[in-house]
Image (spheres, rainbow, N blue to C red):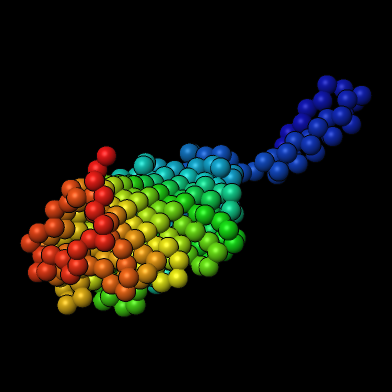
Amino acid sequence: MKTICASRFFSGACFSLAVFLLGSASSFGQATRTWVSGVGDDVNPCSRTAPCKTFAGAISKTAAGGEINTLDPGGYGTVTITKSMVIDGIGGGNSSILGSGTNGINISAAATDVITIRNVQINGAGTGIHGIRINNAKAVHIENCEIYNFTTNGVLVDVTSASAGATVEVFIKNCTFRNINPTAAGGNGAVLVKPPVGVNVALSMENTSMEQSAFGLRVEDRGTATLKSCFSGNHVNHGYLAVGSAAAAVINLENCVAANNNNNAASSGVQSFGAFSTVRLSNSTVFGNRTGIITQSGGALISFGNNRVSGNTTNATTAPTSTTPSL
């Protein structure tokens, strides 16, 4: 840093100003907006003209509440997010994360943090574990993403680091999940909501497709999912499954499709399992499944009387628990 003083009288003041400015640069070294490029370098400041190479490299140089953008197509590496921020791949026609043998994105933020992941492709390459694992945050938004080729889950919401009494909100919009846990090992699939005791999860999904996986969506105790205009099909097991064994597990489906889930005798389009589970079905289509709709072990399935359940090997094992007229 070069400091020029007008006279010797001001030299001490100039020296103090120089020290202050150096200290300020150190304190405010993180930028609100940073950039990554396939030809960048993580030693760079992550500016538009000197971008970093990976999301992980840019995280430490991005201020809380800031945004990481991509400049061009590239593979930007797995990343752990620990603060409020946006990761947006809009600038690179194919902004991707290769999560072979690991998780694509881990979210372990504070209970007040809001995370957005947008316009990113996350590929497990057949050995990746979870596409996105959400351990803690106030809210997570996943938009315009493709998540595929993972061995366990596309998105796992287990919020194991969330505080007792917390409600974690997750929003998934305009996304595609495919080839997630295709061997159907364990209770894993495209999207799994599995909060611990004392923590609640509220999931909203819109315009999202879940394909060729162990299952589409599974919601367990203390989870509530509301879906609009979603597709879940060609899975080994179930399209949509609520499992409420000790606390409420709820799935609300509006204008959704469950199709061609018929790869084994237990496959179903829509299932409510357990005395604490509820599935509400409105204006939705269930066809081509081994069993269209099924309730087991005291599960409740509420129909609004405007659905189409047809062309399944067995359309329904039982009638809906109740039918609620549309108002």
Q: Name the residue rendered at 13%, 65% in the picture.
A: 315
Q: In this rendering, does residue 58 appear at all?
A: no
Residue sitting nearer the eye, 145 or 71? 145
Which x, y percent locates residue 83?
57, 51
Give 12 or 90, whichever is nearer the viewer.
90
Quarter of the image for the N terminus: give it.
top right
Q: Is residue 313 left or right of residue 77?
A: left
Where residue 67 appears, x then y in whole percent?
A: 50, 42
On the image, the x and y values in percent for residue 47 come to 52, 40
Position in image of residue 39 (x %, y %): 41, 50
Residue closer to the observer: 278 or 210: 278
Farthest residue toward the top?
6
Viewer-side residue, 149 vs 302: 302
Tell me if 233 is positioned left or right of 208 in this view.
left
> Based on the displayed image, in which of its 4 quarters is residue 11 positioned?
top right
Q: Is residue 143 above or below residue 213?
A: above
Q: Residue furthest left?
A: 311
Whether residue 33 is visible here, answered yes or no, is: yes
Badge count: 0
**Left/right of residue 17 with respect to residue 301 in the rendered view:** right
Question: What's the residue at 27%, 39% (across, down)?
Answer: 327
Quarter assignment of residue 98 = bottom left
Q: What is the residue that sits farthest to the right in this orientation?
A: 9
Residue at left offset 34%, top offset 77%: 186
Answer above or below: position of 179 versus 322.
below
- The residue located at (59%, 54%) in the rendering is 110
